[in-house]
Every structure is written in C-alpha cells, then in structure tokens.
Amino acid sequence: MSNFCTKIMYLSVGITILLGVGCERKVEAVQRFQFHLESVPKKAKVFNLRGREMGKTPFLTELKAGDYALKLELENYEPQWFLFAITPGKKHHHRITLDPITASILVDSNPEGVQVSLKDRPIGITPVVVSGLSVGTHSLTLTKTGYAPQTTHIEIKDARPRQVIVLLTSNIGRIVLNSNPPGAHVFIDDREHGITPYQAELPEGQYRVRISKSGYSEVNDVISVVREKSVKKNFILVELPGKVTITTEPDKVDVYIDDKPYGQTPLSVELPAGNHMIRVTRQGFDSDTREITIVAAAESKTHFTLTRNTGGIDLLVNPPGTMIYVNGKIFGVTEQDGDNKNLSKVMQLRQLNAGTYKITAAHRHAVPDKKTIEVIVPKGAIARPNRINLWVANAELKLNSGSVKIGMIYSENADEVVFGPEPGVKIKYSRSEIEYLKPLMRENN
C-alpha cells in the first residue's frame, strides 16, 4: 500500500474528519481556527474523507486543531488529495494548482513524411506522437510539398491515447513563362527560379511572379496554378534609361548633379548616358565630389561616406546651479538630475570646431569658487572629460552638544549622515548625535 493511501487510512480511522462529528467524553468549548483553501483554476469542488462535498474554492471554514484530508475535483482536471494539519498560532491559507487532464495521439499520414503543426507550431514529421493535449478540440495542419495542405480536428475527451491517419492529395500544376527579349530572370515569391523561357511544376495556388532583365523595366504579375493544368504567360519588357542610385552616410545629404540640385539622399535619378559630376554636401560635414559614368539602359550605385568636420563635449559638473564658461564666454548653468540636489545632468556642447577649449566651472559659494580644465575636441568626435565636482556648502548641521557646522551633505539615510565641514573632509554622524540638519536657504549662483 502506498504511503499516501496509508496516510488516508490512518486519517480516516484515527484523526478528526473535516467537519465530522467526533465522540467526546464531555462537552466543552473547542477552539477553532480559520482555514482558507484556494485552487488554480478556481471553483474546484471540495470533498472530505467521507465523500461529502463541502463547497467550492475559494473555500473558507473554521476547524479544530488536528490533521485533515481534502479532495479537490474540477472538470477536465486530475482530482487531487490535500493533507494538512491545523496548528494553533499558524496561518492556514493554502493554494493548490490542479493538473489538467491530457492525452497523446499518434498522427500518421499517407504519404508519410508530412509536416504536422499544432497552432502554427511545428510538432514533427509523420508518424509522430503529439502529447500533452488538453481536453477539448485541437486542430492539426499537415503539409508536404506537392500535396494540398490538410487540416484535421481532434477532440480530446479523456486521457485515452488515440491514433489519427490523414490522407493527402497531390496538387501539382505547370507554368510556362516567356519574355521578349528572352534571357530575363524569373522570380517567384521573391526567390529566383531561372531564366526565360522558363517552365516548372508548382503546387496549386497563387504566386507572385517578377520578370527582371538588366536595362529593362521589371514586370510583376500574379499567376494562379491549378492542379493537373498548364498556365502560359508571355511578358513584354520595356527598355530603361540609365539610372544611378546615390546613398550616403549619414543620409539626408543635399545632392548636386552637374551643379543642379536634385534633392537629398537616398536618391535614385535617371540621367542621360555619359559622364556626370556628383557633389554631396551637408552642414557639419566635409563636402565630396565624384565623377560617374552612366550607361544607357543600365543601373548603377554610388555611395559617399562624409566626414564630420565638427565635434562636441559631454560635460558633467556638480552641483546643479554651476555656471559654465567656454573659452571665457558663458555657455549655461548646470541643471539638477532627478531628485538628487547634488547631481547635475550631462551638459552637451555641440557643433564645435576641432581644437582645444578651456572649460571653466564657477559657483560663488564653492571652495575654490571655480575650476578650469582644457578639453581637446577631435574632428567628428565627442570629448568626454572627467567629471568636475565643486565643493559647495549646502546644509547646516547642529549636534546635540550645541556645535553648529556649515558644510556639504555627501550622503544620508535613516541611521546616519556623512557630512563635510570643509573640502576634503568627511565625517560620519549617527542620527542620535544630531539635533537638526537643514539645507541652506540661498541662491546657488
């Protein structure tokens, strides 16, 4: 006998049965405790050891201290026993996940070697076992090149395994494609298949056909293939003028051809045969010029990679409210980053010519009141110098001893404060030592 069955037997004989009536020698008040049982999914029936239905989940009742067993049942799910003990002083809230009833089916086909999919997810090649199917109706799709797709519906009522055999029928037709002039490339559903004159066998259905030949306009069509029939198509190709496609890095660059504006890249232009001068230009980049040769009824591509002729600086200066000067001229004031009053957002300086710049950070309450660094800006790049931190007193701290200090708060939490009464000095104080800590009420700069 399994351990579980043994426990059930002992529970049914020797312990208190859920909500059952026991024999007591004397009538006295018995303390009961709240018991809460949930299931996933909900609305499972709850039975005691006697088979009596007690309710449905979520199930709430009160029980005496002791050992209990409950059985949960829900349609299309495996029944499940739950053993538990009611102990004074503990929470009795339980959550049980029920396992759905599942079954397996053997899928076979004629012919064999057919791809089987369940909800557009490939399962395998016939013969194949599809397992873990829940109770209900499931749709299987069987596909094989040269045969019409077949969908079959399987109804699962219980855990009994089943076998399904599916018959597939051939769906092959023929296409014959010609072009004037011949020698054109044939694309079917965007995949190249050959050169005209072209013929092939294809499964029944609709196909996107594209006929392409260098120097001629493409022809697009949709062809319907019918099983056991032949479809013929003739395509007349029209000769194209010369064309050039101009691309650049970056894009949106102004294009001049033979000193005439043509728009911005990416750009495709039809031009007469011969030599042409192309010039590309964009603010912040070096211009570039190139000569190209256009061939009649042909397409060509040319690409320009422009070099940026300006750079920039990403500058991080703390605290917020610091004035920034670039080569002696005011650029702006640092702004607070989020909720931290001591940290600033990154300040971006752009469209700077390559060279060396003097960056000065100034704050009238800082010690010292300003710092200056030199930053080299390379051509076409962003310089990122080290962060500049100015020491600025931002708070007044009074200790329980009566000592008052003016300085900077470096960090603080519920238990302690790291405070600096002067540059380079950090002192840690516990909250119990501090009478008050308040910010300095003054303008930053």
Image: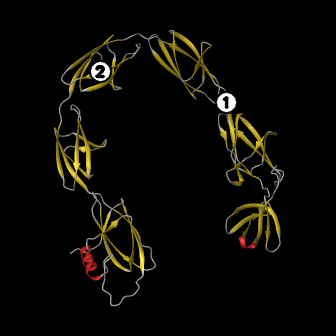
Label placed on residue 309: 1
Q: Which residue is mark 2?
A: 223
Residue displayed at 34% across by 16% down: 184
Quick check: 336 above or below 204? below
Q: Is residue 247 visible?
A: yes
Q: Is residue 353 visible?
A: no
Location of the N terminus by quadrant is bottom left
Report the front residue among 140 and 318. Answer: 140
Residue displayed at 33% across by 67% down: 55
Where residue 27 sits in the image (x, y, percent)?
36, 88
Label placed on residue 67: none
Indicate the secondary structure of the residue bearing disc 1.
loop
Report the front residue among 89 and 314. Answer: 89
Quick check: 422 above or below 113? below
Indicate the secondary structure of the residue bearing disc 2.
strand
Amino acid at pointer 2: Ile
| Left or right: where 413 falls relative to 124 | right
> Which image quadrant is residue 151 in?
top left
Q: Earlier in the sequence, mark 1 or mark 2?
A: 2
- Dot 1: few (<14), some (14–19), or many (≥20) neighbours within 10 Å? some
Amino acid at pointer 1: Asn
| Left or right: where 293 falls relative to 65 | right
Residue furthest bottom in the image: 25
Where residue 422 sits in the image (x, y, percent)?
80, 62
Where residue 276 sits in the image (x, y, percent)?
56, 12
Mark 1 → mark 2, Cα distance in angstroms: 54 Å
